[in-house]
Image (tube, rainbow, N blue to C red):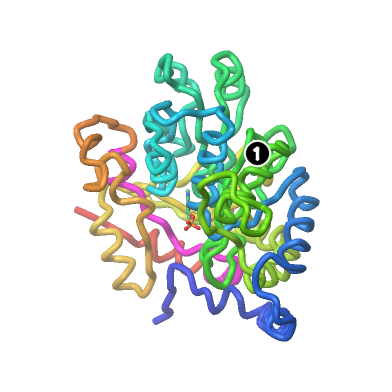
Amino acid sequence: MKQYDLLSLQRLNAPYAQQLKEAAARVIDSGWYLRGAETEAFEQEMASYLGVEYVVGVANGLDALRLILMAYIELGRLQPGDEVIVPANTFIASVLAITDCGLIPRFVEPSATTHNIDTTIIEQAITPRTRAIMVVHLYGRACWDDVLTKTAHRHNLLIVEDNAQALGAYADNGQHTGTLGDAAGTSFYPGKNLGALGDAGMVTTHDKELAQMVRALGNYGGNRRYVYEHKGLNSRIDEMQAAMLRVKLRYIDNENARRSELAHLYNSLIDNKHITLPQLPTKPNTHVWHQYVVRTPYRDAFMQYMHENGIATGIHYPIPPHKQEAYKAYNSLSLPVTEHLAHEVVSLPIAPYFSEQDIEYIAQVINGFETE
Ligand SMILES: *Cc1c(COP(=O)(O)O)cnc(C)c1O
């Protein structure tokens, strides 16, 4: 029987192994491991790839989001106690960034078709204390429309993008995610579409003042040695990860295009009345398929059946942030769309290294799933 992991990082990186080893050797031999030539080159190459003014490499995606919010607080554009709108249906890190900075999350329900925040109901959640909206391009699907930007504009709200899952995606307006809002945080966790070989992240923005503040805050709070204007963190990308990412950045568009082909193939081949397929985007490249997520009310049985057939599946995510023990104060909130999705979503294997035959095989297994 064929066996399929949800994701094999080894297979993902195998095509680049030689180049990655050469880049690693370059860093080792340089004797320079932080804040050096690789980081600078990575930031420049990424800025020109995305079409954004400033890129600041940081330690991981959660720090990228925290540093953005911390920087806005240092700059006086946010204050602890201010409210930040955030999708209820997201990975917990989006919310951790908010609460870690002493800000208050205001959870907004997703659209059940896109799984992204329902931009048409953001306005209802706005109070006099609301100062920002965090949008998450969940599963790689760009979340950006006129309702969002007009609502933000009308209420003078900052927009922070959580771009952890969507590097390389475009919004309908033709601009890359990560360049759309006031600032964006991206993760290069190894399993993300552009993955490092360890932890890494970045902040992207067109705002020079913000970029400088993020860079200072990520370097203990100052950019001059032993002179600190702010109370910062140690959160920098390292030279090794910057070098790894420079290799992989050259292939991200190919990899995302391949993911999209495979997702379309899944949608054309899966035909089972118990399985609801993800909605395909109307414009190409507005979804980079970090995850391919179906829904079924028979999730336990379906996952067990897939497992018995050698195919791993995942759940992104089984418990929404407001139902986590870490957020007891929000446990009593009722967010039915989010909770319903959390009960039904299943992620299927998707990665650029799959062949058409792999997808055909997995789809055929799915089509054989029955329940009483
Ligand atoms: C991965 C992820 C993060 C956090 O990134 P790390 O690099 O793991 O800290 C934040 N938000 C979302 C939506 C993510 O998927």
Asked if residue 317 lies left or right of residue 172, the reply is left
Determine the image quadrant of residue 112: top left
Asked if residue 158 lies left or right of residue 2, the reply is right
Inspect the image, locate mark 1, and give the three-letter code of the amino acid beneath it.
Answer: Leu
Q: Which residues are magenta?
A: 339-358
Residue carrying label 1: 210
Q: Residue furthest front?
A: 227
Considering only vertical position in the picture, is 360 above or below 264? below
Give yes or no for residue 157 being in the magenta stretch: no
Q: What residue sits 46% from the left and 62% below the top?
A: 363
Give yes or no for residue 343 being in the magenta stretch: yes
Secondary structure, mark 1, is helix
Of 184 and 4, nearer the camera is 184
Determine the image quadrant of residue 102: top left
Considering only vertical position in the picture, is 94 above or below 308? above
Asked if residue 29 lies left or right of residue 85, the reply is right
Of 244 and 29, nearer the camera is 29
Q: What residue sits 62% from the left and 49% below the top?
A: 216
Asked if residue 157 lies left or right of residue 369, the reply is right
Indicate the position of residue 5 as horizontal and vertical percent values: 43, 73
Of 205 and 335, nearer the camera is 205
Indicate the position of residue 64 as horizontal and vertical percent values: 55, 50
Q: What residue sits 65% from the left and 74% below the top?
A: 33
Q: What residue sits 61% from the left and 63% below the top?
A: 237
Give the position of the N terminus as an image quadrant.
Answer: bottom left
